[in-house]
Amino acid sequence: MKPHLSTTWQRLLALAVAAAVLTTTAYTFAEEDESKQQEAQKPDYVALAAMLVQDGHYDRAQLELAKVDTSEGSDFDRKTYYTLEGIISLKKKDYQSAVDHLDDAIRYGKVDDMMFVYLAQAYYGLRNWERTILSVRNAEEAGEKIPDLFLMKAHAHRELDQNQQAWSTLRKGAKRFPDKVAFLRQQVFLLVEMGLYRQAADLGEVFLGKADSGVEDYLALGEAFRRAGAHDRAKHLLEEAKLRFPQNQKVLVHLAHAYIATGHLITAGEFLQQAAEFDKKYVLESAELYRRAGAFERALYMNSQVEDQKKKFKQRVAILLDRKQFERIASLEMRLSRLGLLDDQDEQSILYTLAYARFQTGDYEDAERLLKRVTDAQLFESAVQLRKTVQMCQQEPSGC
């Protein structure tokens, strides 16, 4: 799971870099020479942009930078100019432009730890994991003060299947920032990825016992267990979440998926039935799980509550077909026709099923009438065979 990086540290870094920029670009009025004073009073667009960046006005800052004469031979503060362009590109999530501008700033002499902090963020956005790790290392002292850089570096190692290095980075970060729960969280996920489920469960209890852990943490960890194939662990964890957050719809849905993975379809259907009390979109899926489990009465009950009429009757036909209730399917022809399901080229399985139901009830003429309308390539051969059977039964009813 890719760690969520807070925006707070980005703002702090922007302020820090902008402040550093301002110290190199501030107006100087101490010179007594009149010509120098006149030169100092000319608009310094780079300095103006730096102040705007410091105040968080990135679009306006970019407008000021656009006024800078960057032609060859022009005199402007290139280090600061490209640094600001890099910061603005980062804020706009234009990571490749950020890398290009920051590299230019370094090329013109802006070499300090904070530049590599920004480069690390840009490479992380580009999913260039090797460069992310290298930039974090180059950030040195500045990077040691920013917990999110440890998380970025650990995630980059995980993406490169360097689990040992990722674990080492997370341990170092957790030791340096003991109040940062994100390190513990990522350690748990890493253990799950490595298949160390018992250790992950034990550490997960510590993580979830933290005061600020919430339902999303339970869900994320439960999903991690489920994707790793540790379905029993996932179910146990999500059952705990249900006790702690009994009215949370997402917990019920995740529990349902965990039980689907172990083949417990009725239990999964029950959880989705509960979730449907909060959101009607789960009614159809609950009915489908009951149908697949053979709990047809429950399936019909949930199906009766489906609001989308096309989906409702398409599913009802499937339930009745499973129950071999062909008379009831045949009786739905008018309703299916009004809903357009018999004319929909993408739903010709409904047309074929209705024809089959007519055949099973001995209504051979209507069965053939419906079969003539089947044109779907995947159903056509079956329709031809059924028509032959219908014709045989019409000729010799006693044989059917």
Image (cartoon, grey):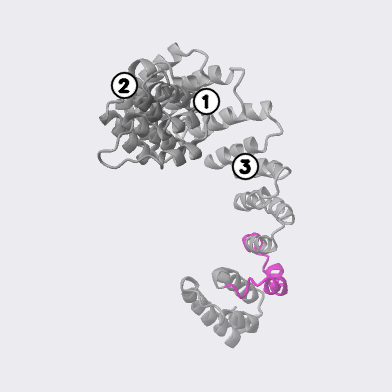
Q: In the rendered view, would you say 368 is above or below 282?
A: below
The residue stretch that appears in magenta: 319-344
Task: Report, in whole angstroms, how far the alpha carbon at label 3 lies from the one at label 2.
Answer: 47 Å
Q: In the rendered view, would you say 392 is above or below 336?
A: below
Label 2: element kind: helix
> In the rendering, at what x and y percent does residue 116 appear?
34, 25
**Label located before the other in sequence (2 or 1):** 1
The structure residue drawn at horizontal position 40% and vertical position 29%, both measured from the top left corner, is: 38
> In the rendering, at what x and y percent does residue 251 appear?
63, 35
- The answer to whether 183 appears left or right of 367 in the picture is left
Task: Report, in whole angstroms, how far the alpha carbon at label 1 lies from the one at label 3.
Answer: 40 Å
Mark 3 lies on residue: 268
The structure residue drawn at horizontal position 57% and vertical position 41%, both measured from the top left corner, is: 257
Mark 2 lies on residue: 137
The answer to whether mark 2 and mark 1 are in CB contact below 8 A is no
- The answer to whether 283 appears left or right of 57 in the picture is right
Q: Nearer the viewer, mark 3 or mark 2?
A: 2
